Image (cartoon, rainbow, N blue to C red):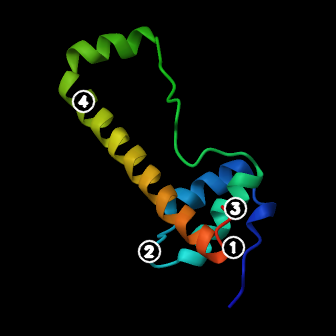
């Protein structure tokens, strides 16, 4: 099987594949992506989400509060999933490298 060299990927490409990779089905691939992201000092999830002060977003909050709440909940769910994935992959990387992450 062809092995991808993730170290040659851009930060955007790495972020995209990190979001998409199934670390349960493809643990070695997830570990390779994780290592490449660490090399480039790229966050595995959004530790500091951007806040917006756009006036239209403030107005939208009041008029469409329920849809914004569901978007926020979805975003928070995704961030928790990415954090959990990182923890699983850290264990894999440690196992592959004799305990070094």
The alpha-carbon separation of the residues under discs 4 and 1 comes to 42 Å
The alpha-carbon separation of the residues under discs 3 and 4 comes to 34 Å
* Relative to 66, 51 lies left or right: right
Q: Which residue in the protein does label 4 denote?
A: 69
Query: What secondary structure is found at the residue carrying circle 4?
Result: helix
Q: Residues within 10 Å of mark 3 (few under 14, many from 20)?
A: some
Q: Residues within 10 Å of mark 4 (few under 14, many from 20)?
A: few
Sequence order check, earlier mark of 3 and 4: 3
Marks 1,3: beta carbons within 8 A: no
Q: Residue at x 58, y 68 (%)?
A: 30
Q: Which residue in the protein does label 2 denote?
A: 24
The alpha-carbon separation of the residues under discs 2 and 4 comes to 30 Å
Q: Which residue in the protein does label 1 denote?
A: 97
Q: How many marks?
A: 4
Residue positioned most to the left = 66
Q: Is 39 situated above or below 61?
A: below
Where is residue 1 shown, x and y percent of the image? 68, 91
Give the number of the mark in front: 2 or 4.
2
Sequence order check, earlier mark of 2 and 4: 2
Q: Which residue in the protein does label 3 denote?
A: 35
In depth, the one of 49 and 64 nearer the eye is 49
The alpha-carbon separation of the residues under discs 3 and 2 comes to 17 Å
Sequence order check, earlier mark of 1 and 2: 2
- Which quarter of the figure has residue 90? bottom right
């Amino acid at each position: 099987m062809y092995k991808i060299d993730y170290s040659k990927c851009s930060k955007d490409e790495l972020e995209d594949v990190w979001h998409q990779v199934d670390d349960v089905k493809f643990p070695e691939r997830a570990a390779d992506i994780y290592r490449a992201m660490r090399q480039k000092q790229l966050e595995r999830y959004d530790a500091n989400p951007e806040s917006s002060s756009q006036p239209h977003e403030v107005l939208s909050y009041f008029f469409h509060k329920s849809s914004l709440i569901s978007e926020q909940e979805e975003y928070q769910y995704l961030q928790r999933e990415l954090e959990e994935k990182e923890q699983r992959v850290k264990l894999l990387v440690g196992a592959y490298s004799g305990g070094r992450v």
